Image (cartoon, grey):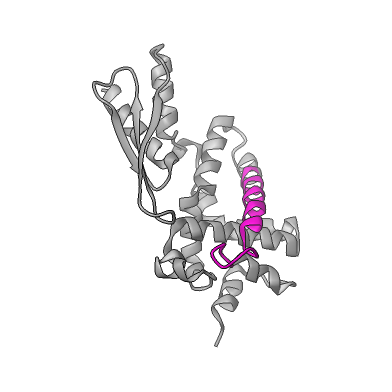
Amino acid sequence: MLSPQEKLCRALAYQFSDSRLIVQALTHRSIGSKNNERLEFLGDAVLGCIIADELFHRFPAATEGELTRLRASLVKGATLAVIGRELNLGDCLRLGSGELKSGGFRRDSILACGVEAILGAVYIDGGFEATKALIRRLYQQRLEAASPETAKKDPKTRLQELLQSRQQALPIYEQTSVEGESHDQIFHVVCRAEGLDELAKGKGTSRRKAEQDAARKAYQIIAK
């Protein structure tokens, strides 16, 4: 019977020459100093480069803004977490006892970082072309479904452009509180902008997501 790690390599259609790399890629920082954070850093950069190259050649008429939004939608944490689940990555991750008890193997952020770390490990082990082939396999259906027409601007950008079109001041975001423990936090943010009778409130698992939530609500009110 194959181990979870062997099943993962089969799902990746990639066999590591140096098995220590895949072990490190699957090791969360809660285990210790020999973890996947450096590989994650590398994988994030390589992924962004390869996806940008794919989009550049697939959509020769797309504008810079459209390409940027398409790339962002493909490399964002939520997309990477879905890929991690498709690979059953949670079964392979090496987590400390605290993360195991809190369900870290299901958390989007940990799954997304794990996928990026795997890409970094493949890059070191097999080089750029091997990593490019893997990313193409993982993203095949997503790339085929991608379209500049469906690349939506994020709420903060839409709100900013709306205010600028009216020659109004840019919105101001302020974090008001953070709930929960360090591994499972909820951020609360308010947005101030012209056209709002009261503050638009947002929340999310990161400050960025909370700001986007607040911007979405502010836009809905101001655009009416």
Q: Which residue is pictured at 40% across the width and 23% down the height?
A: 171
Position of residue 57 measured from the top left corner of the image (x, y, whole percent) = 65, 41
Position of residue 28 measured from the top left corner of the image (x, y, whole percent) = 56, 64
Q: Is 30 in the magenta?
A: yes
Instruction: Pick the residue in front: 80 or 90.
Output: 90
Which stretch is magenta?
Answer: 27-52
Q: Is residue 167 above or below residue 213?
A: above
Q: Is residue 63 above or below residue 143?
A: above
Position of residue 54 measured from the top left corner of the image (x, y, whole percent) = 63, 46
Q: State which quadrant residue 133 falls in.
A: bottom right
Instruction: Pick the residue in front: 169 or 17.
Output: 169
Say whether residue 177 is visible.
yes
In which quadrant is the C terminus drawn? top left
Task: Look at the magenta stretch and give its main secondary structure.
Answer: helix
Say whether residue 63 is visible.
no
In which quadrant is the N terminus drawn? bottom right
Instruction: Pick the residue in front: 131 or 38.
Output: 38
Q: Is residue 117 above or below residue 9?
A: above
Position of residue 184 measured from the top left corner of the image (x, y, whole percent) = 40, 55
Q: Is residue 105 left or right of residue 1?
A: left
Instruction: Pick the residue in front: 91 or 34.
Output: 34
Q: Is residue 142 above or below residue 2?
A: above
Q: State which quadrant residue 158 falls in.
A: top left
Q: Which residue is pictured at 55% across the width and 57% down the height?
A: 113
Farthest residue in the left direction? Answer: 197
Q: Which residue is pictured at 69% across the width and 62% down the height?
A: 122
